[in-house]
Each structure stands twice: as C-alpha cells, then as structure tokens.
C-alpha cells in the first residue's frame, strides 16, 4: 500500500499539483483503487465461484446442503471475504491522516461484525427451514428462528459496543448487568413475550394457520405469523389483530384447529322454549306424530310430555343427518340437553358435529338445519319464546 501511495504521490507532484492537494487526492485515488480491486475480485472471481458451487450443490440428492448452503448463504460468504479484504486494506489508507487511523479501524471491525452477523442469520434461517421441512406441523421452529436471531443480534450488538468503546466484552456485559433493572423495566413486554412464545411452541399450543379465537382482542381467524413478541391473526373479515404472546398464555384463547383437522365443524345452538307450551300428549295423539320410530324408550301407552318427544325426535334428526360425524369416533358427542329455566324460557341446547369443514358450505348447511328444527316446534305443540315487549320492526 505504501508503494501505491509513493507512485500516486510522484505522479501528482510531477503534474505540478501543490502539496496541500497531493495528500487528499492520493488518498482518494488509493481508496478508489482498493474499492475497484475488491469489486473486481467479487464480481469476477468470488461470485462466479459461488455460482459454480451452487450448481454442484443442486446436483446432490439430499436437500440438507440445498438449505444450509443456499445461494444467499454462498453469496454472503463471498461478501464476507470481500469485507475482510476491505477491512484489512482500509487502515492503510490513512497514511497521511494518522489521527483518523483508529476511527477507520473501528469502522472496519464493525463492518466485519455486521457481515458475519448477516451470514449467521442466513444460516439460522436455513437451519430452521430444514427443521420445518422435517416437521411442518411444529410451531416451535418459528420461535426457534426468532430466538436464534435474537441471540445473534444481541451478541453482535455487544461486540459492536465493545469495539466502539475499545473495551473488553466482559466489561460491556458487566456494565449492562448493572443496568439490568432498567433494561428489564424498558423491555418488560419483550421479555414476557419471549418467554410466552417459547411456552406456546414447546407445548405445541399454537402454530401458523391455526384458527383461534381471543375474545378480549376481538380476534377470530387464522394465525399468520408467530414470533417471540407478536402473534399476528388474520381475522375472517380480513383485518389483522396483533396479540402479545404473554396475553394468550395468561388470559387463554380458543384453538379450533383440532376440530378442522378432523374434517368436522360444530353445530351448537340454544332454543328458548316457552314453558307455557310444555304439556302432556294423550296416547291417541302420539300416533299422529309418528313417535314410535324415535321414542322407543318411552311408554307411549301413557301420557307423554311433548318436550320429551321433541328432544328424542331432534336427537334422531341429528344422528340421521347425511353429513353427521359418527358419534362414536373421536368422542363426537351428539346430545340435546335442557338447561335450567331462565326468565326468557327453558333453554334447549343441541350439540353435534358435521363433516363439512368448508366455512361457506357449513353456514348454509347449519342454517337449513336450524330452519327445519324451528319449523318443527309447532308440530309438537311447542312454542319458541319471544318477548312481547320487543319493539316491532318498521320498514
């Protein structure tokens, strides 16, 4: 490098330039020469070599090297080699400016740390992508990726601080330790989110594309992204809800993905029966209802309560539905139950599953079924409760 400065200085002095111009101009020309040489090295040597290596990697049968040694990783290695060369040559450009030597050295070290950090981040992404290929259903891979990148980022930040302050890394860590209370107060949400994200992943409580419901945050939709600090939910109305992971762990949420994984949806509805319409049916009227086929556990020769017949008819209706999930498989309960009476009537709840995971088809199927059940109440002499105090709807 000194030889290069001697040549440039002799050329500029021979050109008759004053001494005040020779030093900065020779430094600028030497800098351009170094950058041009490093650029030529990268574009005409390192980049073609990296492309050749990538071509050979793609020929292998395994996908491990394709992921861990992706084109971006190989290109990052080439950039790291170029960065190291620039960092080695740059301090020598301060021949005429010794006071700037230390600042240039620090800048070169920071640049090298940044290049190494970029390479490690790419490798961590490749490693996590490889784990996702092996186990696509496990959400811990995404949190592991964020955790690794956080560790790499924190480590790089500590190294950069130690380089800028010209102190040992142990000194920087001890100084940060004295500020631990302040840091914990400032980054409390991030720390809580990180711990909660790890718990969600390790316990396999949540993964991307799961359908979850979080009432407090008005979230009802699919999980789009799961990180250490945020769970992004795409609601069914296409809006986005960003929920801190610690809120899911502390306050709870509903995960309905297991139901969809089984290929079923749940029909659960409560009808409020007017208690004044509940009465016994004489035996001679029972035959008109055709109750023999769905009330074989009742003594039809004696008066029977109409609500009892209706419950048995409704259960048989659910069991005989063309898309009803088998009641004996995976505990697919089918029941009609009475809930304690309320001022708005006697609640009658139905609960069963249908093999219809598609949302639009399910809503149409559910509406048709509810319509049919609602229309059957008068057949058994029952009425649904309706408040007389409700205001009339006016067009």
Image (tube, rainbow, N blue to C red):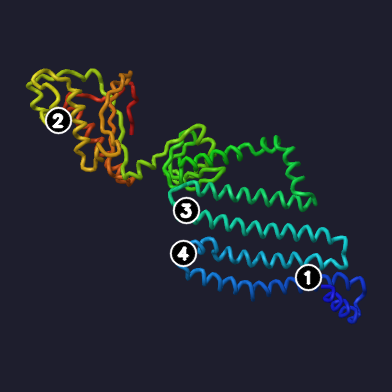
Gap in Å between the C-alphas at discs 4 and 2?
A: 61 Å
Verify CB contact (< 8 Å) between mark 1 and mark 3: no
Q: Quadrant of residue 75?
A: bottom right
Q: Which comes before the other along the chain, label 3 or label 2?
A: 3
Verify CB contact (< 8 Å) between mark 4 and mark 2: no
Q: Which comes before the other along the chain, label 4 or label 2?
A: 4
The residue pinned by badge 2 equals: 294
Tell which tag, 3 or 2, sits nearer the viewer.
3
Specify whether 269 is left or right of 376: right
Specify whether 387 is left or right of 58: left
Q: Please provide percent x and percent y for residue 209.
A: 43, 47
Q: Please provide percent x and percent y for residue 95.
A: 86, 68
The residue pinned by badge 4 equals: 62
Tell which tag, 1 or 3, sits nearer the viewer.
3
Q: Please provide percent x and percent y for residue 98.
A: 88, 63
Q: For the residue carrying disc 3, how many other residues have a C-alpha within 10 Å: few (<14), some (14-19), or many (20+)? A: some
The residue pinned by badge 1 equals: 31
Gap in Å between the C-alphas at discs 2 and 1?
A: 93 Å
Rendered-image quadrant of the N terminus:
bottom right
Give the SS element for disc 1.
Answer: helix
Give the SS element for disc 2.
Answer: loop
The residue pinned by badge 3 equals: 132
Q: Which comes before the other along the chain, label 1 or label 3?
A: 1
Furthest residue in direction bottom, as rendered:
14
Gap in Å between the C-alphas at discs 1 and 4?
A: 44 Å
Q: Please provide percent x and percent y for residue 145.
A: 55, 50
Give the SS element for disc 4.
Answer: loop
Tell which tag, 4 or 2, sits nearer the viewer.
4
Q: Nearer the viewer, residue 255 or 53?
A: 53
Gap in Å between the C-alphas at discs 3 and 2?
A: 51 Å
Q: For the residue carrying disc 2, how many other residues have a C-alpha within 10 Å: few (<14), some (14-19), or many (20+)? A: some
Give the SS element for disc 3.
Answer: helix
């Amino acid at each position: 490098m000194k030889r290069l400065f001697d040549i440039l200085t002799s050329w500029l002095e021979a050109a008759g330039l004053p001494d005040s111009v020779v030093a900065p101009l020779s430094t600028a020309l030497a800098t351009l020469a170094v950058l041009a040489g490093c650029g030529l090295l990268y574009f005409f040597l390192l980049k073609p070599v990296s492309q050749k290596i990538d071509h050979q990697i793609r020929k292998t049968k395994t996908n491990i090297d394709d992921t861990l040694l992706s084109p971006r990783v190989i290109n990052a290695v080439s950039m790291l080699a170029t960065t190291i060369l620039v960092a080695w040559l740059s301090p020598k450009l301060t021949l005429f400016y010794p006071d700037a030597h230390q600042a240039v050295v620090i800048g070169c070290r920071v640049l090298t740390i940044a290049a190494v950090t970029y390479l490690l981040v790419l490798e961590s992404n490749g490693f996590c992508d490889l784990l996702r290929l092996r186990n696509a259903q496990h959400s811990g891979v995404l949190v592991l990726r964020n955790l690794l990148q956080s560790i790499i980022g924190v480590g790089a930040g500590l190294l950069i601080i130690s380089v800028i302050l010209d102190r040992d890394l142990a000194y920087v860590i001890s100084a940060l330790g004295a500020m631990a209370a302040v840091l914990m107060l400032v980054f409390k949400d991030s720390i809580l989110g990180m711990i909660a994200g790890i718990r969600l992943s390790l316990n396999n409580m949540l993964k991307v594309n799961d359908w979850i419901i979080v009432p407090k945050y008005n979230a009802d939709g699919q999980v789009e992204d799961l990180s250490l600090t945020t769970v992004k939910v795409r609601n069914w109305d296409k809006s986005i809800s960003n929920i801190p992971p610690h809120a899911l762990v502390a306050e709870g949420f509903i995960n309905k993905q297991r139901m969809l994984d089984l290929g079923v949806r749940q029909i659960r509805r409560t009808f409020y029966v007017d208690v004044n319409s509940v009465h016994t049916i004489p035996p001679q009227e029972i035959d008109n209802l055709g109750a023999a086929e769905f009330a074989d556990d009742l003594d039809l020769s004696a008066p029977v309560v109409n609500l009892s017949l209706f419950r048995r008819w409704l259960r048989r209706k659910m069991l005989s539905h063309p898309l009803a999930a088998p009641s004996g498989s995976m505990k697919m309960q089918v029941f009609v139950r009475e809930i304690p009476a309320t001022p708005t009537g006697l609640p009658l709840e139905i609960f069963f599953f249908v093999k219809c995971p598609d949302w639009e088809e399910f809503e149409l199927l559910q509406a048709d079924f509810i319509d049919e059940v609602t229309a059957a109440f008068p057949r058994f002499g029952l009425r649904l409760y309706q408040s007389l105090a409700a205001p009339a709807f006016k067009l």
